[in-house]
Image: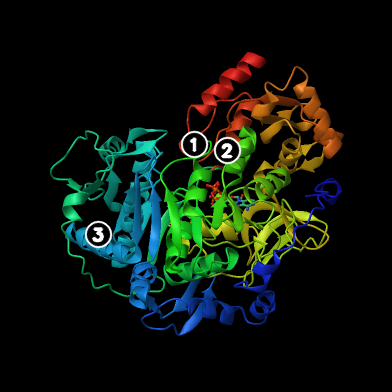
Amino acid sequence: MSEQTLSNLMHEDRRFEPPAGLAADANVKEEAYARADSDREAFWASAAERLDWGQKWDQVLDWSNPPFAKWFVGGTINASVNCVDRHVDAGNGDKVALHWIGEPEDDTRDITYAQLKDEVSKAANALTGLGVQKGDRVAIYMPMIPEVVVAMLACARIGAPHTVVFGGFSADALASRITDCGAKVVITADGGYRRGAPSALKPAVDEAVTKLEDDELASKVLVVRRTGQDVDWDDDRDVWWHEAVDNASADHEPELHDAEHPLFVMYTSGSTGKPKGILHTTGGYLTGTSFTHWEVFDLKDDDVYWCTADVGWITGHSYMVYGPLANGATQVMFEGTPEKGRWWQIVQDYKVTLFYTAPTAIRTFMKQGREIPDAYDMSSLRLLGSVGEPINPEAYVWYREVIGGDRCPVVDTWWQTETGQIMISPLPGVTAGKPGSAMKALPGIAADVVDDDAQSVGNGNGGYLVLKEPWPAMLRTLWGDDERFKDTYWSRWKGLYFAGDGAKLDDDGDIWLLGRVDDVMNVSGHRLSTTEIESALVSHPKVAEAAVVGAADETTGQAVCAFVILRDSAGDGGEDIVEELRKHVAKEIGAIAKPRQIMVVAELPKTRSGKIMRRLLKDVAEDREVGDVTTLADSTVMDLIKSKSSGSS
Ligand code: ATP
Ligand code: MG
């Protein structure tokens, strides 16, 4: 990306120092950066020491055959033992692991670590009873109920890698994932609750099964009864959870697995194309997630942590299941989606202290207005996190002020399904945060921003975000496709992992994510980032959310097309809203970034993890057939936008 265009962007100068108390008592202090720099492997070895191992490792990192890393070579470990048994053994069996909150009001369950251990042990025995052996894959297609956590940990316990498929995905998406990773068993539920009503899941599994070509696939389907709705039943294949699991023994002697034993396969959210089966293994993944969870959220014994992510997304794996449970945290798990005041009611009722969500949710709440959160007592909160997309400076400041009472630091965490763990983030007790910046690579992580020739761009410049050293929770390969793994991530520049994101280093060397490099637009020879124009739009008081794409244009090569959602308080924005917003962008960034076209819409197409799918909007802007929508959270959104666009042109 050229310097000339980036130099006039991001003139953000607000700074937020860490609260004094948090800084004084922080789990990780400034010295960690230097300690990790002086001996990266020793740093990660000490992070691994926080876990319980069987056999200790002989070698921290084997990088003799890059890009195939092995961490904690020779070590043996069981992830489920680390997430449950060891807390019970340490005398914390009565500590609540999950405050589970169902979507229907008053449908709640508190589950202690001792209870979780029993449930996981029973489920492990039941899976073994269904013929699941170490190394077999299990697909999990479930709502946000405690059994999904139990199922994942039971798989980990017996060494059967799981692949969790988001419950909102179609039968086709499920069938293709079962096929790609060769899952022998599927764990599901009759249904789950969505927007106040039971919504069926089992029929999608039944349909997926008919699409499988191999009888070995999904030969057993274990079904949790959640909603009680009617389901079709195949006596040979289907098994009720409450029969198989509830009647199983709560004694299960766990086997220790090799540190590099596959833990799970997670398909990426598909914001940019066909999902990839990311493979994570056991020892390094658990080290990276548990350590960063303790580090970035400054987790203390009495914290109540809540990550709002769906378990079908990597954030649900790393920062709801494995990281927090390995740390013995007490957390909230909520079955529903964001509705007006419900989240804040939960924060108030459960005295949540650490809260982790996505920019898309924050912008939705901004749209609705601050009166809603203002009605709740959220003084328990002490730290806020963000993940999934760049957080626009305005959304960051709103989050900090309205949700965090201007007292809680915001950690903007950059990472990917592939990285497994948070890579770039402020340290809450150390970093003076800048709204919109993910700041620095965490201790032990080597990130840089480079140009086309893999040279560091240096402060004040933009380029490609790369990772220069292996890290414990890194993906090991793409399931069954080592070549695609090498091609996708390691082929652009020798020895560098290329993440696909553009970034800028500011004058202090802090990192600003600029969105996917594939989304960078070229307007009359100027390179413009989607994130920056979107942030400029969101800084207008009438705008809650914006998505920008570059559409082919005869005169300028590409032209900026914007889709905006207005705040509720703005009404329809008034007659001149489009012109007003075009001028605003010109003022904030420059005339070159002025959108050719702005469409006011009610919704934007998003993945379940809340990412805007710009490639679909680009199809609309270029008046093409809309591409693959299988990973959209709500597939009707595109029809709405298309009808609107044909109406307006
Ligand atoms: P696919 O790779 O199939 O297109 P995906 O990249 O959307 O799917 P994820 O692994 O869930 O799937 O998303 C990782 C991406 O999310 C990052 O590459 C980055 O673009 C974006 N991202 C995540 N966190 C942040 C953040 N804090 N700031 C900016 N971008 C972020
Ligand atoms: Mg990606």
Tell me the residue that label 3 is attached to: 123
Q: Is residue 336 left or right of residue 243?
A: right
Q: CA distance from mark 3 to mark 1?
A: 31 Å
Q: Which image quadrant: the C terminus? A: top right
Q: Is residue 148 left or right of residue 304?
A: left
Q: Please rate how many residues cluster around mark 2, counting C-alpha atoms within 10 Å: few if below 14, some from 14 to 19, many from 20.
A: many
Q: Is residue 441 left or right of residue 161?
A: right
Mark toward the viewer: 3 or 1: 3
Q: Position of residue 359 (x, y in %)?
A: 61, 45
Q: Position of residue 311 (x, y in %)?
A: 43, 51
Q: Image point 66% across, 80% down: which residue?
A: 35
Q: Image point 48% across, 32% down: which residue?
A: 634
Q: Secondary structure at mark 3?
A: helix
Q: Please rate how many residues cluster around mark 3, counting C-alpha atoms within 10 Å: few if below 14, some from 14 to 19, many from 20.
A: many
Q: Secondary structure at mark 2?
A: loop
Q: Is mark 1 within 8 Å of ligand 1?
A: no
Comparing 549 with 405, the one in front is 405
The numbered disc on residue 632 is: 1
| Above or below for 559 versus 376 | above
| Above or below for 375 versus 309 | above
Tell me the residue that label 2 is attached to: 613
